[in-house]
Image: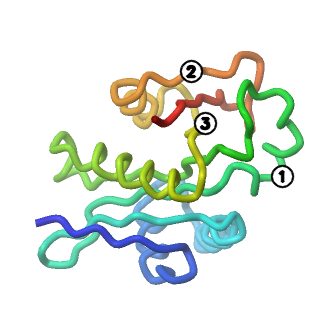
Amino acid sequence: MTQFITGDTKSLRKYMTAIVNMQPWIETPEERNAWIQRATSMNSKVILAVDDRHRLIGSFLFYPSINDDWIREHADDFPFDVEKAFTITLVWVHESQRGKGLGKQLFEKAHEMAKEQGLNVRVGYGAATQDIWSFTKAYSNPTIVDGLEYGGQHIQYTLIK
């Protein structure tokens, strides 16, 4: 049975190390530490999925979008109030668990946590070829913000009901 653990990057630091170690695009110890420090500075919230043997099988991280300097600088370019938005930074499901609904459960838990904080717009960015884009399109039909890119990557958003 899957158990969900929620918190922030500080309280779940030991898991944060495991999460970033599993990401092939975070290659060096320096990059891993920098990634964790940035997630912590953004006041990221964490949802972990663990199996009955307490093995990490999924994760979802998000932070209030307004905590990002770039988002604040471009606030007028967004078609929504960025103070009510949250940015997803890492959604991961272990290969053995994909296609079983765990990603959807993580999204739903993240939406609940975000709404409790008064956040109702989910923001994401990335290359359109990344798996997360296929998943979010199937799950929630996001809208791409025309003419606005974050680090060369398209930005998408979804209003959360």
Coordinates of residue 98 in the picture (x, y in percent): 21, 45
Q: Secondary structure at mark 2?
A: strand
Residue type, label 3? Tyr
Q: Residue furthest top?
A: 146
Quick one: 94 or 24, which is closer to the camera? 94
Q: CA distance from mark 1 to mark 3?
A: 15 Å
- Which residue position holds label 1? 69
- Which residue position holds label 3? 125
Quarter of the image with the N terminus is bottom left
Is 139 drawn above or below residue 22 in the view shown?
A: above
- Which residue position holds label 2? 143
Coordinates of residue 147 in the picture (x, y in percent): 77, 18
In the rendered view, does 42 fall on the left or right side of 101?
right
Q: Secondary structure at mark 3?
A: strand
Marks 1 and 3: which is nearer the front? 1
Q: Secondary structure at mark 1?
A: helix
**Residue at horizontal 30 percent and vertical 46 percent from the top:** 103
Q: CA distance from mark 2 to mark 1?
A: 22 Å
Residue type, label 1? Asp
Coordinates of residue 75 in the picture (x, y in percent): 83, 37
Dot 2 alpha-carbon crowd within 10 angstroms: few under 14, some 14 to 19, many 20 or more = few
Dot 3 alpha-carbon crowd within 10 angstroms: few under 14, some 14 to 19, many 20 or more = many
Q: CA distance from mark 2 to mark 3?
A: 11 Å
Q: Are marks 1 and 3 in contact (CB under 8 Å)?
A: no
Quick one: 11 or 53, which is closer to the camera? 11
Quarter of image, res 149: top right
Is 76 drawn above or below residue 56 in the view shown?
A: above
**Residue at horizontal 47 percent and vertical 66 percent from the top:** 46
